[in-house]
Amino acid sequence: MTHIPYGKAASGPWAVEITPGLAGWTYSGLRVADLAADPIAFTTGEEEALVLPLSGSCSVTFGDMVEGGTTTFHLAGRASVFSGPTDFAYLPIGTDVILRGTGRVALPSARATRRLPARHVPAEQVPIEIRGAGQASRQVNNFCAPGVFDCDKLVAVEVLTPGGNWSSYPPHKHDTPNPGEAVLEEIYYFEGGPGYQRVYTSERGHIDTLAEVAPGDVVLVPYGYHGPSMAAPGYDLYYLNVLAGPAGQRSMAFCDDPRHAWIRGTWDGQEVDPRLPFGRTS
């Protein structure tokens, strides 16, 4: 199943739980929880993970829960995904964790082998990038992009598309080990909308998805061209991209669908959508 509506991947305390086993691949994962009165305890196991507030705030306590040698990160969070970037926490493999707070939190993850130190990153250190122009204008919060934040395998970014605009455009893929293209398993997790997400066939195999997406929905991209992500007029669209793959060096390198690659050349003559950026001006 490529499109997973909200509620179809719920398990235990997780409103969304996408494991590599459920997705039928090797590396990428995602959990989402709606935090309330009860804390959520879990272990990262063989995965490195991020704690990313989507709305609200939370605390992240980790370490030796038995002996009491624990550390707590307090994440200030944000009102919503359209309020600007948020602070976040990184948790290494083999870590016991307790989450407490209110609101919705996402935990992008990837199977990893290196154990890196736990870290807290403030929101003001998250780079904002504006891509495209005209009706292809969108915002990318590069909080866990290669060259921005160090992980073993995990890559994650947030993309915000104003109503009526297209993102993930031109359509592109990360599924063949070519120069300039990384092999990656990719998850799209949506808030806002409604919107639409397209995934279609590449030389790796047949796939054909055009899904209407709403808050909490997930689209899996095991291979194939993906895009556009279309925000319906009047409805801003958010998605969290989670990517990981077998390469020793993290990369988001992609290959455009050659039928549509020419679109990039049209942006120089167009203005960026004045509704961008969301939530922050610097």
Image (tube, rainbow, N blue to C red):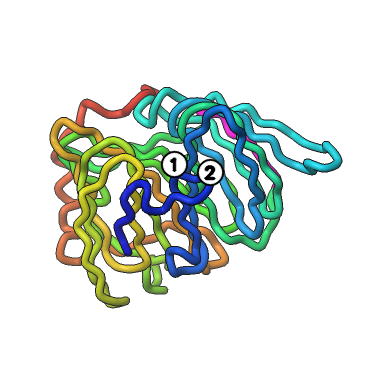
Q: Residue 66 location, x and y as percent?
A: 82, 42
Residue linked to disc 1: 142
- Residue 200 locus on image (x, y percent): 23, 66
The earlier-in-sequence mark between 2 and 1 is 2
Most distant residue in the right direction: 67
Magenta stretch in the rendered image: 117-123
- The amino acid sitting under disc 2 is Pro
Q: Residue at x 83, y 38 (%)?
A: 69
Residue highlighted by disc 2: 13
Q: Is residue 77 visible?
A: no
Q: CA distance from mark 2 to mark 1?
A: 28 Å
Where residue 52 sits: x, y (%)?
Answer: 51, 37
Q: Describe residue 271's horizontal placement relative to residue 155 as left or right.
A: left
Name above or below for residue 278 compared with residue 7: above
Could you tell me if residue 48 is visible in this image? yes
Q: Nearer the viewer, residue 132 or 101?
A: 101
Q: Is residue 120 magenta?
A: yes
Relative to 277, 252 lies left or right = right
Residue at the location (23% across, 26% down)? 275
Q: Nearer the viewer, residue 157 or 34?
A: 34
Mark nearer the viewer, 2 or 1: 2
**Which residue is painted at 44% across and 69% down in the image?**
24
Three-letter residue code for mark 1: Asn
